[in-house]
Amino acid sequence: MLQDMRENAQGTIAKVIIGLLILSLSVWGMDAIIGGFGGEPEVATVNGQDITEREFLRVVQLESQNRLSRMERPDPSLLNEDQIRVDVLQALIEEQVLAQDADEQGLALSEADVDALITQMPQFQVNGQFNRDQFVAVVRNAGMGVGEFRSAMRKQTVVNQIRAGIVASGVVTSDSITRLMKIQNQTRDFRLLSISANAVADQVNVSVDDIQAFYDSNPNLFQQPEQVDVSYVVLSLTALADAIVISDEELLTYYQSREADLAREERRAAHILIEDTADADALVESIQQRLADGEDFAALAQELSIDTVSGEQGGDLGFAGRGVYDPAFDEALFSLEPGVVSDPVRTSFGVHLIKVNDVRRSDVPALADVAAQLRDDLAREQAREAYAQARTTLADSAYAADNLEGPAKDLNLELRQADSITRNGGGEPFDHAGLVRQLFSEDVLNGGYNTELIDVADNRAVVARVRVYRGAEMLPLAGVEDAIRSNLEAEKTRTALVARASEMAAQLQAGESLQDITDDSWTTYIEQPRSAPELGGGVMQTVYALPRPQAGGVSYGHTVTGNGAVVIALDKVNEGEVNTDSTEYVQLQEFLASLDGQREYTAYQQWLRNNAEVERP
């Protein structure tokens, strides 16, 4: 349960709650924390309790930001806002149902419980202490009320308690695990007979009529998509920086201001990593006591750390500078004196005890050694303001102009051209979906307007306009004839191979000898596991799909491979061994029990949802 509480506490909602808690205590007092809200419009009512429009819109915004963060190139225009709203409302309804069920079961978090949970979060500590300014910033950025946030925190925590309890109740019998492991560890003895494509080459003939018929019956395969030829300009921070000349005096001043950064400090850390479970705090206290009693840190890391790779080296992580590790780990590491063990540090990996084994500092490099890099850095810093101004100017002028020549000339930008851009895009920068969508918009495609200024990458923006539009058209047969012939030959070859292999397998299963069927011979494989990589997934999948042969008998099958086909003779199925004391057995037991618990929880959720009275305005 505590693990679920911590996971919840590290989410966006919990971060905001902490800020609101501290702010409210210092500004409005406890009444502001426990006070409620009323009179807000609702988006749904669940068993008589409202889901407010305010809460709904806040979660929609958070979910939109979350989906943007998962994009390789974040583009708000790619978000399906209607679907996000549907998904969020459904999630809030399910959350409300679960929270009401928790109330009925008497599960609750007191004010003190919420405070204790919140104030333990390292994300809001500076040098181990709460920082009020950080809290205030979180409150303002979240745009929520204090009571609303604390209510959300309490709701999520008790819901997670129910989930954890049901999931933990999952059970699986030892017989089920044993049967599954026997199947999983099973091996098979079999023989393979290969049939090459050449063996059926005389059956493969593609005529001109075949090609014409395929072309006529599949017009959608031979459509030349609609295309545009475009003109465009690119505004780039890098290009602006390259045009800036840095004087020797400016370089020297910049070098002197960066001396502290250039003198790099690295620390050799060791850690003991403990899984962040309900027992973590007690285990950490036990380790701290053993260290206080004189036991060796490296020996304890080897014995107890779940980071087994570093644990084998006494917890040693090697030398690293700032910014390499998780921020909480990094902060603790660079605040420690050598030889001192840190207090517990929580990260997404678990709970760490950190020790600094060594510190090394490099001298400030000579100006000549870093001059080139510093010139680039300073030029980019100076170019940032010019880029921001130029970006605004380009956006305004491109919007007002009926061409790109004027905006390009005003900003001394190269007017470039690109051809054959389809709705699926083209070469860079037209691999950006937002820019391509603008090109094929009604205003740009048919209205003769420029696109909006599109940020295709960090500090790189593009404006484009269509020069030529070409609609979709059918490709001539002459241009695709060879491709059709190749595809039809491959298809007919595969069909012939399947027929040949199937016929041979049937003959063998009927009792005919291999010598009566072919001059080729079997290749034998003994005790092959499911994952035998040298034979390929298709062959092994067929081998393990064949029925167990009767005593003294053989099961035959066949499959097509990349360059031929194979006939398979399954001779024997070898039962897998099961060691009930093995790590594999324990892990499978835990996984299946968790899976059973998750199914129970999902069914419980659905039952509550089906029996809830939900009203929507």
Image: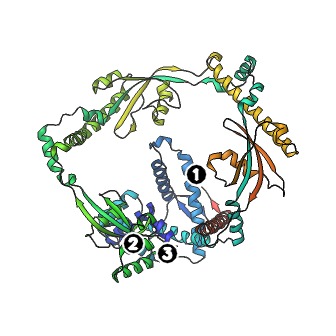
Label 3–label 1 contact, CB within 8 A: no
Q: Earlier in the sequence, mark 3 or mark 2?
A: 2
2 or 1: mark nearer the eye: 2
Q: Position of residue 298 (x, y in %)?
A: 37, 72
For the C terminus, which image quadrant?
Answer: bottom right
Q: Could you tell me residue 161's position as x and y percent? A: 55, 72
Q: Position of residue 190 (x, y in %)?
A: 74, 50
Q: Residue at the location (35% across, 72% down)?
A: 25
Q: Is residue 129 above or below residue 454?
A: below
Residue designated by label 2: 120
Whole-Å distance between the Cαs marked 3 and 1? 35 Å
Marks 3 and 2, how far apart at CA: 15 Å
Within-10-Å neighbours for mark 2: few <14, some 14–19, many 20+: some
Check disc 2 and give the amino acid type.
Gln
**According to the image, label 3 marks what residue?**
278
Instruction: Please give the name of the residue rendered at 18% of the width and 54% of the height, measured from the top-left corner.
Output: 363
Residue in the image at 63% along x and 17% along y: 476
Label ID, residue 544: none
Q: Which scheme is used to colour this image of the protein?
A: rainbow
Name the spot of residue 337 as percent of width and height, x first.
25, 70
What is the secondary structure assignment of the residue under circle 1?
helix
Left or right of 519? Residue 49 is: left
Secondary structure under the numbered disc 3 in the rendered image:
loop
Secondary element at image label 2: loop
Among the 4 quarters of the image, the one containing residue 192: top right
Q: Residue tagged by mark 1? A: 86
